[in-house]
Image: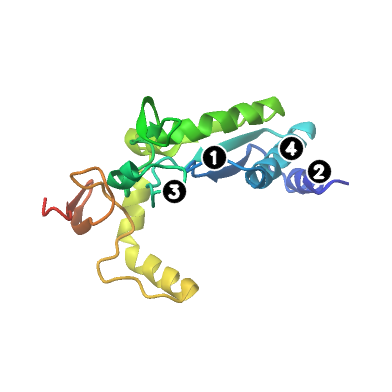
Amino acid sequence: MHWADFTAQRFKESGLDNLVSCSGITPSGEFHIGHLREILTAEMIHRSCIRLGLKSRYIFIVDSMDPLRRVYDFLSPEYQEYIGMPIAYIPAPDNQGIPGNRDISYAEYFLEPFLRALSSIGVFPEVIMNHETYESGKFAEEIDSVIKNKEGIRTIIEEISGRELSKDWFPYNPLGSDGSMDGVTVTGYEYPKVSWIDRFGV
């Protein structure tokens, strides 16, 4: 028995239904063959569940709120001004790596060819763009819960990672006045508003 079929069989024997398989990625550059491993793992479990008559969904989460962390080799130095900004909100590069393509976002530019490649091998996940979920407010209650339990979360992160978080660490990253997450310090929180000051003193 294939391991995915074995997994689905265990779900069925446990009486589980309405199953959800998830995978995700940050489209910070071109995808390579190694990215398929996680995606196909979720897809195989999803297909096996359906074959056994279980209700199943496969969700592909795109971390489009992740910031541009550095100027990669394939980008022009002009992207320096976008470091720290969510890749959903910055322009896509043109064929010289210059931020000139404003018809689609940076995230969409690298995601779309990958989704087309997946469709060519028969993989059609439900795609969720994280920035849209944030914008819709669907994360509001979860964010509130995380903020209220931030000291417990701090302890867990420090114990597992073996590193000490900074005194001003906060489990939610607001965007500063320039649209960047970098250099933003949270100064207060009262649901549903976060108070902060950025590197420009705003």
Neighbour tally class for label 3: few under 14, some 14-19, many 20 plus, Cα within 10 Å: some
Residue that badge 3 annotates: 72
Please identify, in this view, whether the residue under mark 4 or under mark 3 is nearer the observer: 3
Task: Please report whichever mark, 1 or 3, sits nearer to the chain's N-terminal start.
Answer: 1
Residue that badge 4 annotates: 49
Neighbour tally class for label 1: few under 14, some 14-19, many 20 plus, Cα within 10 Å: few
> Residue type at mark 3?
Tyr
Question: Distance between the Cα atoms at labels 1 and 4?
Answer: 31 Å
Return the x and y of residue 198 as percentages of the image width and height: 17, 54
Task: Please report whichever mark, 4 or 2, sits nearer to the chain's N-terminal start.
Answer: 2
> Residue type at mark 4?
Cys
Q: Is residue 133 above or below residue 176?
A: above
State the residue in front, 94 or 83: 94
Q: Which residue corresponds to the image point at 43% horizontal and 34% vertical from the top-left?
A: 96
Q: Helix, strand, or loop for circle 4?
A: helix
Q: Is residue 144 left or right of residue 115?
A: left
Q: Quadrant of residue 150?
A: bottom left
Return the x and y of residue 6 as percentages of the image width and height: 81, 48
Please say if the residues under marks 3 and 2 sit with CB atoms less than 8 Å apart.
Answer: no
Q: Helix, strand, or loop for circle 3?
A: loop
Q: Is residue 25 left or right of residue 199?
A: right
Residue that badge 2 annotates: 5
Q: Helix, strand, or loop for circle 2?
A: helix
> Residue type at mark 2?
Asp
Q: Helix, strand, or loop for circle 1?
A: loop
- Residue 30: mark: 1
